[in-house]
Amino acid sequence: MALDKETIKTRLAEAEEAYHKLLIGAKEVSVNVGNFGSVTYNQTSRTALEAYIANLKAQLAEAEGTPILKRKIIKVSF
């Protein structure tokens, strides 16, 4: 399902706000997922919220035609 850029931007803003509230001590935060309802996150599901934000950023980059640059591991040996 391809979403338009504005919908993705709105969801990303909501998710980032929820993540901020979670990190500053709010016990639970909710994110509206369009017509699909809402999802509630708590401190134990922080990584799930991080993954959701990363997914939204990837969708937004794809919708805007911007490639996401992923960093590679740098190995240093002496």
Image (cartoon, grey):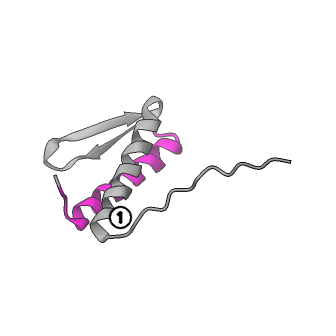
Which residue was labeled with disc 1? 61
Nearest to the observer: residue 40 or residue 64: 64
Nearest to the observer: residue 19 or residue 59: 59
Q: Position of residue 66 (x, y in %)?
A: 37, 69
Question: Which residue is painted at 27% across and 60% down in the image?
Answer: 8
Question: Which residue is painted at 18% across and 50% down in the image?
Answer: 34
**50 sits to left or right of 13:** right
**24 sits to left or right of 48:** right
Residue 55 vertical placement versus 28 (above, below): below
**Dot 1 amino acid type:** Ala
**59 sits to left or right of 48:** left
Tell me which secondary structure the magenta stretch mostly adopts: helix
**How many residues crowd mark 1 within 10 Å: few (<14), some (14–19), many (20+)?**
some
Q: Position of residue 1 (x, y in %)?
A: 16, 52
Direction top: furthest residue: 44
**39 sits to left or right of 73:** left
Q: Position of residue 4 (x, y in %)?
A: 19, 64
First to last magenta residue range:
2-27
Question: Which residue is painted at 46% across and 29% down in the image?
Answer: 44
Give the quadrant of residue 64: bottom left
Q: Is residue 67 magenta?
A: no
Nearest to the observer: residue 28 or residue 35: 35
* Label 1: which secondary element: helix
Give the quadrant of residue 28: top left
Question: Which residue is painted at 18% across and 41% down in the image?
Answer: 37
